Structure formats: C-alpha cells, structure tokens
Amino acid sequence: MATTFVSVPLKKSSEVDLAKPLSKFIQSTYPSGESQAEYVKAAEELNVLRKSAVCRALDKHDSSLEILLRYYDQLCAIEPKFPFSENQLCLTFTWKDAFDKGSLFGGSVKLSFASLGFEKTCILFNIGALASQIASEQNLENDEGLKAAAKYYQLASGVFQHIKDTALTTMNRELTMDTSPDTVGTLSLIMLAQAQEVFFLKAAADKMKDAIIAKLANQAADYYGDAFKQCQFKENLPKEVLPVLAAKHCMMQASAEYHQSVLAKQQKKFGEEISRLQHASDLVKTVGSRYDEYINVKDLSDKIARALTAAKKDNDFIYHDRVPDVKDLDPVGKATLVKPTPVSVPMSQKFTDLFVKMVPLAVQHSLSMYNQRRADLVNRLIAQMRESTNLANGVLASLNLPAAIEDVSGDDIPQSILDKSKAVIQQGGLQTIDQLIRDLPGLLQRNKEILDEAMRILDQEEVTDNELKAKFKERWQRTPSNELYKPLRAEGANLRATLDRAAQADKVVKERYATNSEIIALLCKPEAELNAAIPSGNPTKSLQGSEVIMMLKTLLAALNEVKKDRETFENDIKSVQFDMTTKFLTALAQDGAINEEALSVTELDQNYGSHTQRVQQNLKRQEDLLADIQAAHEEFSKSKQSNTDANQREEMLKKLAAGHDQFVELVGNLKEGTQFYNGITEHLLKFQTKCTDIVFARKTERDELLKDLQQSIAREPSAPNIPAAPAYQIAASVGGTTPAVPTPAPRTVFPSKPEPPEPDASSSTGGCENQPKPQPPARPPPPSVGSNIATPTTTNAPAPVASVGGTGVLTQAQGPPYPTYQGFPGYYPIPMPMAYNQYAYGQYNMPYMYQPPGQPPFQNPQPPQQPGYPYPPQQFYQQ
C-alpha cells in the first residue's frame, strides 16, 4: 500500500562567531598557560561544529543527524560553564520560522534572541525535523527500513514533546510560531501517529494475527484523528498537512475494519464481516473522492472491494446471515507499540566534551566565594599583626626607647636614632614620598576616565533604546536597557565608590605627610647637622649598668623578637595554597548543589587554624611585654635626674623616632595605593570590555529587530480602511421600505452645436456628417431608481430629474458605487461643472458626451454588445 508521510522542514539560522566572545571570556577569567590555550582551542572547535550543524545544508542521513546531536550535547555541556546572559556573555542567535516561506516584500519571519536556551530549542527542533525527514526516506518494503523509520519517528516525537514540556519554560519571551507549545505538541502527535502506522505496516508485512493488526491500525487512526483536530487551528503549518492527516485517519480506520472483518469471517460472523467491509469501503471512497491528490488508496480500495464482493456472494447464496448496522458492532480494540523517545543528555553516543577540564559556573562561583573568604581571613590576620607593630612602635616612641637608655653622654646621637636616619636616607627620604604622591592623581584620573567611558557607553545605548521604545511602543519587544544594565550599573557604582574611598585615603596620607615632613627632612640630614639639631643634655651617668636599664634592654630585645616573628608569620600565611575545585566538584556531583559556606569554613579552619593560633599568641606576648616595659620605664624615670635641657633633648629624640615610624608607614601606604590603582585598572578595563561587548550585542539585536519591524511594516496594507458610504447614498426610498440602491451621479450634459445629425437610430456611431470633427458618443444610461424619468423637450433642458418612488422629487447627486478615495484602482473624482479639456481628462473632469437632438438624455441607442465584453461598448471621437 503506497502511503505518504509528513516531514518537518529545518529551521535556518545566520552565522554567529562563537570563538571570539568565548575566547575573550576565557582569557579574562583564567590565568594564561596551557589550560587557557586549551580552552581557546576548544572554543574554536565549537565554532566549527556550529557551522557544520547550522550553516550548511544537511543531508537526510545519520551522519548529519549525528552532527546536530553532538552540537546540542556540547551546548548542554557548556551552559553551566559560561555565564550566557544579556548582561554578561551576550551572544545573539537569529533563527527563521521553519514553516514561513516569506513574502515578496517582507521576507520570512525570524527572531533574534540573546539566549543559549533559544539556540538549544532551535537545534532540538532541527533534530526532530531531520529525524522526520530521514524516516520518510526509509524503504518500507524491507524490515530494516521499517525499524529505522519507527525509530526516527519516535525520536522526532520525543524531541518535539521535550520542546513543549521543558525547553520553552526557560525563556520568558514569545518565540516564532514553529516553536510555540501548540505547534510542537501537534508535530509530536503527528510523528507518533506515523510511528504507529509504521508498526502497523510491519505487522502486516510479518503477517501477524489480524486481531493485532486491526488494533494497531485503530490506534494509528486514533492518533491521526487527534492530530487532525489540533491541526485545524494551525494556520502556519503547510496546507497539505491537514488533508494528509484526514486521509490517514480514514485509511487507518478502513484498514482496522478490514482486518477485523477477516477476524469476523474466521469466527463465522459473516454479517459482521460484510458490515465492516462496507464501512471500510465507504471510508476509502471518501479518501479517494476528497484526498486523491495527496493519498493513493487504489490498492487498499481494490482489496476491500474484492473481499466485500466475495463476502456478499457467499452470504447471499450460502449463509444468509443478517448484516448488522456498523454502529451496533463492537468497537475495534487499540494497541500501541510506540512512545516518544525521551531526550536525555548526551543524545549522541560519540559525544566528547570539548571543555571537559573547565569547571562549571557553580563551582567557579563557589571558588570565588572561597577565595574571598580566604582573602578576608588572611587580610584580617595581617592587619592585626601590623596594627600591633604600629602600636608597639608608638609606645616606644612615646617613652623615647631605646634612645633614653642609650643616651649616656648627652651630646652624641643615640645609635637607634642613627639607624633610623640611615634607613630613611636609604629609602630615598622625602623624594620617594614626593614622587609617590605625584603619581597618585594621574593613576586615579586614569581609572576614573576608564569608568566614565564605560558608563557613557551604557548611557548612550540606553538613550537610543528609550527613543526607539517611545517611537515603536508595544512593537519594541525586548528587555529595556535600564533593566538589563542594573547589575552593570551596580558594579560601576561599587567601583566608583571604591575610587572615591581611595581618593579620600590619599587625602589623609597627604595630610599626615604635611604634618611629619619637617621631622622626616631632619632625619635625612647628615649626621653632623642631625646632631646639631638635637639639644644637649646632662643625664646621670650613674644609672648606666643599673638593674632597671638592664631590664629595659631585655624587654626591648624580647619585643623586637616578637615583631620579627610577625614577619615570618605573614609570609607563612600568604604562602598557604589549597585548591578547592575537587571538593566543590565532588559535592556538585553527589548532591547536585554546593554548600559553599560549610565547605569553605571547614577547609579554612584546617589550613589557617594553626596560623591564627600563633598570631593570637604573638599578640598576647606583645601585650605583656609592653606592660612590663611601661612599668620599668616608670621606675627608670623616677631614678633619673633630669633638667630642662634634658627634657628638650628627650622630646626631640622622641620626635625623630616617631618621624622614622611615620616615614615607613607613609611609604608603605603610598606603595599600597599605587599597587591598588594599578590593580583596579585591570578590573576596570575588564568592566569596560564587558560594557562594550553587551552594547555591541544590543546593537546587533537592535539592528535585527529594526529590520524585522521594517519588514513587518512593509507587509501592512498602505491604504486606509474603506470608508462607509455617506448617508445620502444609502437613503431609504420615499414612501416604501426598500432602501434605494446607490447609483452613479447624473452627469451634466452640455448642449451641442445646432447642426442635427443623421436621424438614424440604429447607427452605431451616433455622429453627424456636417460637423468639422466627430463628437464623443453618449455614455451608457445610468440605472434608474424610480419609476419615471423626466424627459426634457429641448436641448437647453435642465439635467434629468430622477423620480424616486414616482414622486418626482429631485435626488442629490450620487457618487460611484465603489470606494472613492485616492489610491483605489477604480478611483476618479466627481466631474466639475466646467468645459471639456482634453488635456485634463481623468484629472478633474470627464469628457462630455454628445447628445443628438430629440434624444432623451443618457438614453441614446447603443450598438450591439461584443461577445465576451461585460459592459456596453463606448466609442470616443476627437472633438
């Protein structure tokens, strides 16, 4: 039995460069090295795979389907590894409607959408479409072809059902008609019906029991009937689908009745056999009369006819069994052997993930959070140690230690002050600080300019989007820029706040430098000048070697050891490294989610617990030493006899010691500021690149949407709606209930020259021999509305008066019975009361019509009408 199957056309897409944006993201996210190079190469291979799957014609073969399956699997694999979104990694995909053939002016319907889910949906649609095409190409005369066709139809059904159930829920946007839930649901049912039909054909070819074959056919008829009901409201599907489904529904019913009749014959129910065969015959006759253009049922019809003839003959001569009505028969059972093939990733048996070593975004996010927690912990520990060091230096400087116990002569510079002076000179002194301070404004301004440019790009695109939204209103269907850019603007605000805080910190550093610049400059002077600047004193030499001084020296040495230990602790803390990727991947594989906080806190305790304990012990040790130093210094101060000069000397030594500490802290702060500005520049450049990329993607999307809107506007009718006829043209007839029929307005007939024409009523020309040039013939008479026509008796008679209802009332001039606006094919304006102008014909007047004397207006005889010409002939002559 020859049959026809429905196949689905492929969607078409424009080319998209995947390699460039993916490579930029990889280079900005992952450190340079072998992994980065491997990921960039994988991005290029993915771009080649898309070109093979989308941008070339696909053969109806397994190899082409395998390419689509591999590309879909790869999309599913990279989805959790790249931040595909409109405000991050923005890729705009454009796909055309599979069933739209386009128009002469508008082109085909297409949609541009910055969503990887949209790309996956369209690829899935093409997988189902290509599977249906491959199934329709199978040879159903052999067993292998039947099995392959059933397999591919079930795959297509499962794919379309998957699009309906899950794929579209991830996109909050109306898609093209071919991927709408209603359309793909209908396609899934059609594919399932065809798979059931293939199983029916296989059962018939294998000569299985007629009861089973009838049930398979009846189930196929049921599927086709449901698909037919759904297709009745799908205007976007090809026009041949609906009659094919209707014909298949009847054919499968007829086949079911035929095989059930064979079963009835075997059960010696001859009347039931005849009834079922008659019903089957009626069904195939319906197909032959209505759908013979699409389905050939001759073989099935002949088989049923032969069986029916034989059954009737046997029943008439032998059995004489009563033929029941088909409605009284038991319904044929149903048996389904098909179901939609579920979509499970990977769909391809040969799939290999190109980015197998790249971690998913969930793991990346968890790693980022872990690194932030780790950085906070490390910075907190280091800050605690540095604050403690500054506190110790400040306490010693306030006590003039160790200079107070070194100053034995009262005239020489204490060795600790000399060491501090040499350290300041070796680091460049005031010149180093001045150079660092001069560099900061330029670095700050550079970063501000980068941030301002990024925000300017966003502002400019948002203004353009708002203008287009105001212009096209509800036609402009895309995410507004002010909503899309909220995360970017929030990030930009955070960056600007960070720069403002840095600028404020720079201001504080400059103020501190201005306060301590004189004492730092004094430390930079040569030893002789520094000694001259320190007042002389006369301390008591008898205290040298005393117990209190020895105690102070011991305590100061212990404090120096504590401060040196902190340098070792800081290096140890910074060197701790641990890769949490494995743990996060394991948690994601086992639980499907990552409890980042619990895993991070546990790991940080294991790696930094001992360091934290050592730091706290160190801080406690310093606290105890400072208390002992202060107590010993108080005893030292009581024992020391001092005078005014000694007090001044001690104050100067305190200032020099404090100046050294301020210099070290200022240089450290300025270098950290310079490092901060250089570091944030890279982050700002990435932010600017992100803004540039999303604006470029939005521009591409905007251009596509504008093109679609232009095509949509071009397809709209340019003429306005046909206006309603004026009231005076639809006036009801006077004295009656029948409304007056609109008629053309009576034309004014200008009197002709007095020369009478030949009084030949049968003449086809209606002209006069004595006239210098022929006159145009009379127009055909307008249809009269009333019962009487007032006929003038002279050539100077007034215009004809139409009698409406026999009352002789003059009607208003009526326009032509068709629309009368410019641009309509039959338009011409009402003639103005002016003389004929042959150069203005058809513009503001019509050529007047010649009227022979003695003839009623508009009633001159007409020549015989030519065959095939629907209107009376009209002949024109030059005036």
Image (tube, rainbow, N blue to C red):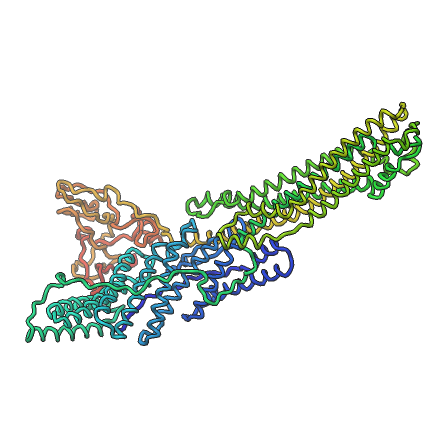
Relative to 835, residue 154 above or below = below
- Identity of the residue drawn at 28% across and 67% down: 197
Q: Can residue 388 be seen in this view?
A: yes
Say if 524 sits above or below 851 in the image.
above
Closest to the observer, 123 or 458: 123
Image: 159 above or below 610: below
Residue 552 appears in which quarter of the rendering?
top right
Q: Is residue 813 left or right of residue 21?
A: left
The picture places residue 425, in percent across and down from the top left corner, at 85, 41
Residue 784 spot, x, y in % from top left: 17, 49
Q: Position of residue 165 (x, y in %)?
A: 37, 54
Q: How many marks do you count on the picture? A: 0
Near-viewer residue (420 or 493): 420
In the image, farthest residue toward the front: 547
Q: Position of residue 140 (x, y in %)?
A: 32, 74
Along the line of sight, which residue is nearer the eye, 763 or 480? 480
Q: What residue sits 32% from the left and 63% below the top?
A: 192
Q: Is residue 687 visible?
A: no
Q: In this view, does 685 lie to the left or right of 355?
A: right
Q: Nearer the viewer, residue 286 or 78?
A: 78
Q: Is residue 122 above or below residue 310?
A: above
Q: State the quadrant of the N terminus.
A: bottom left
Q: In which quarter of the image is the C terminus?
A: bottom left
Please name the residue shown 59% across and 40% down the image.
493
Residue at the far top in the pictured view: 644
Q: In this view, does 321 lie to the left or right of 472?
A: left
